[in-house]
Image: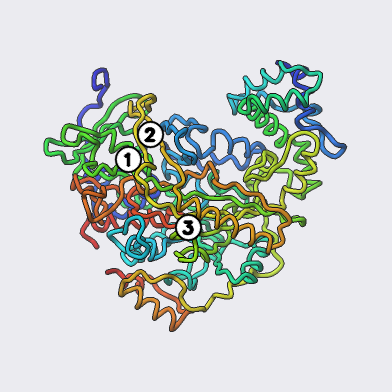
Amino acid sequence: MLEGRRWSAGLSVAHALVIGAGASGAAFAWRLAGHGWDVTCLERGHWQPDLSTPQSARDWEVRRLTDRSPNPNVRRSPADYPVLDDTSIIKPAIFNGVGGSTVLWSAHAPRFRPSDFRVRSLDGVGRDWPITYWDLAAYYEVNDEVVGVSGRHGDPGNPPRTPRQTPPVPLGPAGRRVVAALERLGWDWWPTDGQLLTEPYGGRLPCNGCGPCEMGCQRGARASADNTYWPRAIAAGARLITGATVSRIVTDGRGMAAGAEWVDDAGEWHRTDADVVVLAANGIGTPRLLLASASPQHPNGLANSSGQVGRNLMLHPIAGVSGIWDEPLASWAGNDAFCLLTQHFYETDLQRDFVRGYEMQLTRGQGPLITALGGFGLGISWGAGHHTRFEELFGHVATAAVTCEDLPHPDNRITLDDSVRDRAGVPAARMHYQVEDNAARMLDHGIASAERLLREAGAKETRVTRVLPGAGFHLMGTARMGADAADSVVDADCRAHDVANLLVIDGSVFASAAAVNPTPTIQAVALRAADRLAGAA
Amino acid sequence: MSDVSLAPFLAALLPGDGRWPSAADLDLALAAMVSAVPESASALEVVAGLPAGDPVAALEGLAERDPATFGAFQVAVYGAYYSHPRVLAVIEERCGYPARAPQPRGHVVPLVDPDPLPTCLGGQPRWRPDGTQIADTVRATQAADPDRMWSREEIEQWRP
């Protein structure tokens, strides 16, 4: 494998080598550099030019289906690695570049609840985390200050938090109808937190309601790790090397992490040595690299004596229930993915046939092309009658997204598939994922609740997509955290049980998935891991 | 493949109705779509080779026996159609959606008055205790003063 490679002269030495420049890697690099550590980050992708987002082009929706697709198998960027997904009913939604998948995300930013960390103790399912909400509470606040969060404090449905950096995003006409319905039904709701500015903050502009946050934000209103953490991390001394595709983590004779081998865009190979190696490559990329870094000391993959690397993939099955109103709602206006959240069905209720629970967030409508193609199960035929139906739908739709807690299952997992390799010769990741029984029952309940809510809000028709197939963006559990080295990959401080100088800091370490978007928790975990490594917490 | 050979199928897929133009009557940028969606090149070829006598039946047959090819054809044609200036002008006229790209001007969310606040605002804590002592302490403080403005320094004190 090593023959024929062209190597750069000499080795460079870094104190901590972070692999992946996304949500977790950026937060970690900033925090650790702030403690005086020498930090280098390797990122296989590149910076995104400020004006590279396509929302200024007339064919912006075509771009959403092609080169700005969140699915790497559709996008086919040179920076992407193959993710074989025919064994998963939910397809991957990730991005490789500075900022990682926060470049193409919608910025909904609720926090986990305290109970989410104690699911085994409270409900007898899954695994407890070896840390609690209270270990992370202060880090959530640090993260909010860096990224800028819109929202409103005072939610009695969650532990207290500080006043948000900017006010909440507007509810809009559909949101107001749904809020009135929630109040009539007696279901709790809250104007949810988002990493999306509604007023200027930190030198960034506020949102102007263009719609598709998940295509990138040329105004910088929507936070992504490249416009929040990375400028700070670089100012603090961290080095970021882009176009650096890691092939494996190198270990020494004792089986400790020694650094990483990587190839640049020109095909030249490099090795960067480090005292500590930190994996931040997301719930797919991280287990892929661990498994690809097998060695005589670690024959089943690095840090995998438990056999848990790659297993317990949790994605959040999400149902999309769209309401269609007679009256026009201009539902294309505003950030498309969230304006309110109800956690009324979030906790275990023994009267139901499932444990744990789900949240519902209200998303707005889509653009003309996605509407015409029947996105979110809208049901619109081609041919005669197409345009009549289009006029009934476009601007008249809002969708309740039912996000269900996923429980860990060993067969939902990431494996290597050497039928395809990336430019560094690393086998493709293969996703294996089915909705487990508890979540399936939860989906049924959530869909019924969403239909009831939307009807109460005046929708004349509802359309259901039982599991959104493209929603593989919450990637958790594939190198889980635990106190027992026989049953988990890393400890409470994100250190690998098997390799003391190897950390995993992304969503892979989640022992449970909760039923909310994971990014703020990913970032809080990464910030805490940096403090723990530096002895500052 | 030529526009002539595709025309009956474009008209069948997206017919005009007096307000909306037929896809066959527009100069659709299908070449650009082929560039953006490589799968559409072969799909357009397949459609162009279908019997044109009854294009609706021909497309229905294709959708049934080869949904992937039909889907690629549909995405290519819809993509070109729904980004065409004449179609965008109709959308603006019929639906109120501005006939321009979303940026740089954005869209204004219609507002007539401030958004309502949840009636649970100021209410008692509703989150589930996790069995820790700090949870009980925080809940008690939150219950005593639901509208309290918490500082980061106070929250720092919760750390075990």
Q: Which of marks 2 and 1 is nearer the N terminus?
A: 1
The chain letter for the residue carrying disc 2 is A
The chain letter for the residue carrying disc 1 is A
Using the numbered discs, state the Cα–Cα distance from disc 2 to disc 1 in whole angstroms: 9 Å
Quadrant of the snapshot with the C terminus of chain A: bottom left
Horizontal and vertical percent for residue A451?
64, 57
Q: Which colour scheme is used?
A: rainbow
Which mark's residue is nearer the viewer, 3 or 2? Answer: 2
Q: Give the residue type at disc 1.
A: Pro
Q: Which of marks 3 and 2 is nearer the N terminus?
A: 3
Q: Is residue A436 visible?
A: yes
- State the residue position of label 3: A109
- State the residue position of label 2: A429
Horizontal and vertical percent for residue B107?
67, 53
Q: Residue furthest left?
A: A254
Q: Is residue B72 left or right of residue A512?
A: right
Q: Is residue A493 left or right of residue A362?
A: left
Q: Give the residue type at disc 2.
A: Ala
Q: Give a yes or no on whether discs 3 and 2 share a subunit.
A: yes
Q: Say the numbered circle drawn on residue A287.
A: 1
Q: Which residue is painted at 85% across and 39% down in the image?
A: B19
